[in-house]
Image (spheres, helix red, strand yellow):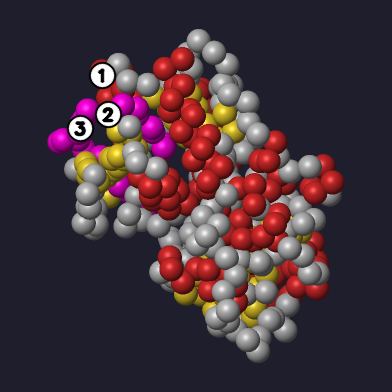
Amino acid sequence: MKIGFFTDSYFPEIDGVTYTIKLWREELERKGHEVYVIYPDGDYDPGEREIPVTSMPNPFYAGYRIPLTKRPSTLPDLDVVHCHGPMPIGLLGRYYARKHDLPSIYTHHTPLEEYFHQNVKFESIASTLSKLYVPLENAFLQSFDIVTASTERIDRDVEHVQLPVGIDMNFFQSTDEDWYPDRTVVGYSGRLSMEKNVSEILRAAEALPEYDFVIVGDGPYRECLEENAPENVDIRGFLPREELPVFYSSIDTFVTASTADTLGLSTLEANACGTPVAAADVPPFDRTIGADNGERFTYGDRESMVEAIETCLATDRDTRAGVERYAVDYTMDHLEQLYETVPLATDESPTDVESRWRISEEERS
């Protein structure tokens, strides 16, 4: 099957969507499919079946780009179009599917309206923008044959299939190598942007001077975070992908205060490497982080955050077993089924989702 991934997030930019597309492509091609990635061009040399679209830097969000052309220069005859975002490349994919009468799937990765509240100074303006944006995205999603989302967090008046992006359990596992054998280290890996609320981690570090905090990542807030970091915080750039399992295995607890994740891939990757996670008690972590793989804290409450971190440090648990249900193998099996049935999707209700992706009430407590 020839599958077209249309995405506005791709290399050299590093984020969850980029790595999800890379992982899905590798897994699907391992199963014998041909996957083409259509993305905005940038400082990245395209490989086989990677098709860049002429673009310019996004003036509103550093690191991302805006396509300038209406269509990619070359595309093969595809069997299915799979869009990974609502921005220009996503619109291009939907146009291509409609023009060529192809089945179309949309994966909802990011609740973009939340970025208005994070990045617009005045809440009244942010609320207005959000109210204007959501109906537009609803209409866009309703034009697809099938919509998938990582968790139940998607707040849209659109029928959808719950399909976690999945993690590579063979790649993310505990390692013998330990970077911090004689230190107690709390870690974070991810984009350093407003919606990730890394400043909350700095507040926790101030209250826990006896522990070291290591933050790996990059983004528009890195300089500000470095200027305000206490002495026990080490802020670095993104690690090479192949070093992440060692990092996750070396730290004693992973912490995140993000309020804009749809699944929180880095938290599950840390769990797969045997490391517990302290996360804000907000979606999606209220569904993915429970007693078997970490602790949740009240967002904005430093005392609650500190308590969650210390509980993670003091409690032994088999965190890998807690995230087996998110293995990418399960995701790929379901995705292939969707590709095979998508032409009928407009006449039938979306496929129900296996219970392996739902955390029980007991686990959530």
Name the one closer to the observer, 321 or 270: 321
Report how far apart the C-alphas of labels 2 and 1 lie in the structure. 9 Å
Inspect the image, locate mark 1, and give the three-letter code of the amino acid beneath it. His
- Please give left or right for residue 159 compared with residue 243 in the image: right
Residue at the image point whose x is 57% and y is 65% from the top: 173
> On the rendered structure, is 105 left or right of 3?
right
Mark 3 highlights which residue? Answer: 76
| Sequence-earlier tag: 1 or 3 | 3
Q: Quadrant of residue 87?
A: top left
Residue 183 percent across, percent down from the top left: 66, 86
Q: Which mark is residue 78?
A: 2
**Looking at the image, is 205 positioned above or below residue 27?**
below
User: Is there CB contact under 8 Å for labels 2 and 3?
Assistant: yes
- The 10 Å Cα crowd at callout 1, few under 14, some 14 to 19, many 20 or more, is few
Q: Are discs 2 and 1 less than 8 Å apart at CB?
A: yes
Alpha carbon distance from label 2 to label 3: 6 Å
Residue 68 x, y percent position in the rendering: 21, 38
Which one is nearer the viewer's eye here, 112 or 340? Answer: 340
Picture coordinates of residue 165 (x, y %)?
52, 44
